[in-house]
Amino acid sequence: MPKWLDHAVFYEIYPQTFLDTNADGIGDFQGIINKLDYIKDLGCNAIWLNPCFVSPFSDAGYDVADYYHTAPRYGTNEDLKRLFQEAHSRGLHVLLDLVPGHTSVEHPWFKASMRPERNEYSDRYIWTDSAWEWTENMPCLRGISQRDGSCAVNFFSTQPALNYGYYERTRSWQQSPEDEGPRATLEEMKNVMRFWLGLGCDGFRVDMAGSLVKNDPEGKGTMALWRKVRAFLDEEFPEAAIISEWGEPDKSLPGGFHMDFLLHFGPSHYNDLFRCEEPFFSDRGQGDASAFVEKYLETCEKAGGDGLICLPSGNHDMDRLAKYVEGEQLKLAFTFLLTMPGAPFVYYGDEIGMRQVEGLTSVEGGYSRTGARTPMQWDGGVNAGFSAAPASELYIPLDPAPDRPTVQDQQGKADSLYSYVKGLLALRREHPALQNRSGIRFVGDGAPGVPLAYERECEGERLLVVVNPRSQTASFPWNGALGEAVFCLGAPAVQAAGAVTAAPASAGIYRIS
Ligand code: TEU
Ligand code: CA
């Protein structure tokens, strides 16, 4: 287990829209390098960079055409290497985004795989024996090649699925994970990891990690595959970290990942908190966090071990946090996000409450996701400081709202969301009990009338976190002694007659013994 994960706090960067330094309207590696100090100053010490490899960009780069070269629009491999070095010199770690489940249709492997004569890449993808036979319960491409057969796709139709085999096999064309083709695919993916780790990256966020082995309802085949990858990393790159886009830590962590996310899909009830009609983080008070808490505890129990369960503020696939959670509620949501166990993940711009921009034309397969990928709003200058290109040439248009939040504006204000997030991250650093591996015990589950409340503990330090987003008071039974508040938003909680009552729209962190 890489030691740096004990204190890791991540910042996710969508490179297209972070900072453009050569006025071509799209972000670049140099832009990220220029903002490393900003990320560090905010209180993050690690970065997850969305895919930045050669691609036709039908899915924003999740359709890789060359795993070994960066997309020229961001810079060269050398520039990325420099980014790693500049990050390391500031004590920051960098995860790249590995897309092992599919390539672009333009990848040379796929082109070779479409050829009628057998070759090295014939079994790199999943092909049926005949163009008249579908890929069972997966979508597929048909009528596209001289090779006879239909080819399975993973996501969009431009993303053919790489072949890691089938756990349960019912057709002759379904291979075992132990067959030569699937094994060669995995070996090549290990080579890709070796290559970038060799260049200085610190690990990978792994795209659709839970879906590699097909017909694998319980995930057993896919878990076995990742355990092999983990053994390889432990052996060759013990400080490298991998986090899965899986959303089921009870599978991914025993399956070898160091970390997994709770996400907008999967069984976690994450959406109950921030993204549904009546989220928990709302002053309307109609939301309910108790299903989330119940599932969280069950997942921790089942996952066991020392892996981390991570809560993102958002990501490039979800609506912006600020779409459903507004104003002071964003502070309460961040109080929760930044005081939970696991490594926190802040999606770029969420620290200033960037909004979902509605009504945009889809860019690079973003569709509804496009509105959560708009340019970072740095300041009040041209294009909000994102780019010197003409506004019409920006990768995605800026949030047009005259009152759109900016970093510059919020850095100057003590009561801004930016200052709040920065303050909380500093508090997290100062208190071991609030950090990634410290224990948690829920004492209030966010059911109607109840706040979210949990004890965090480490090396003798014990803290109680109480968060009540509602405009009514909320309470929970508690018999301990409520000590000094190390942090407070709104009125502090009061203790009387074996219960703690939290004020409306308040958050507090208290010493307990
Ligand atoms: O996402 C996988 C996925 O299934 C969802 O996050 C999906 O994008 C979302 O539910 C749609 O609203 C990963 C990447 O994060 C995503 O950006 C890619 O498009 C996808 O894989 C394919 O690589
Ligand atoms: Ca650029």
Image (tube, rainbow, N blue to C red):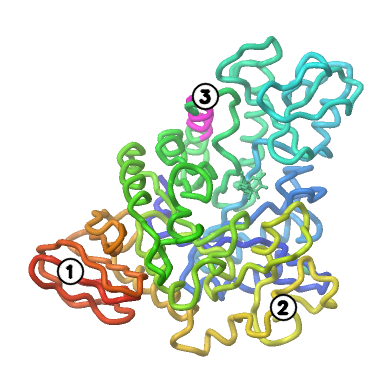
Q: Residues within 10 Å of mark 2 (few under 14, many from 20)?
A: few
Label 1 element class: strand
Pick whichever of labels 3 and 1 is earlier in the sequence: 3
In the image, is 128 to the left or to the right of 332?
A: right
Q: Picture coordinates of residue 436 (x, y %)?
A: 36, 57
Residue under pointer 3: 221
Tag nearer the camera, 2 or 3: 2
Near-viewer residue (432 or 481): 481
Is the residue 477 above or below the residue 425 in the image? above
Q: Which mark is residue 225?
A: none
- Please give the name of the residue rendered at 31% of the width and 71% of the height, measured from the top-left corner: 430
Label 2 element class: loop
Q: Picture coordinates of residue 386 (x, y %)?
A: 72, 76
Task: Give the position of the N terminus as an image quadrant.
Answer: top left
Would residue 474 be counted in the magenta stretch? no
Near-viewer residue (158 or 51): 158
Q: Amino acid at mark 1?
A: Val
- Please give the name of the residue rendered at 30% of the width and 78% of the height, measured from the top-left corner: 488
Pick whichever of labels 2 and 1 is earlier in the sequence: 2
Q: CA distance from mark 2 to mark 3?
A: 47 Å
| Range of magenta residues | 220-229
Residue 433 in sight here:
no
Q: Which mark is residue 500?
A: 1
Pick whichever of labels 2 and 3 is earlier in the sequence: 3
Q: Picture coordinates of residue 175 (x, y %)?
A: 65, 16
Q: CA distance from mark 2 to mark 1?
A: 44 Å
- Please give the name of the residue rendered at 54% of the width and 69% of the height, measured from the top-left corner: 322
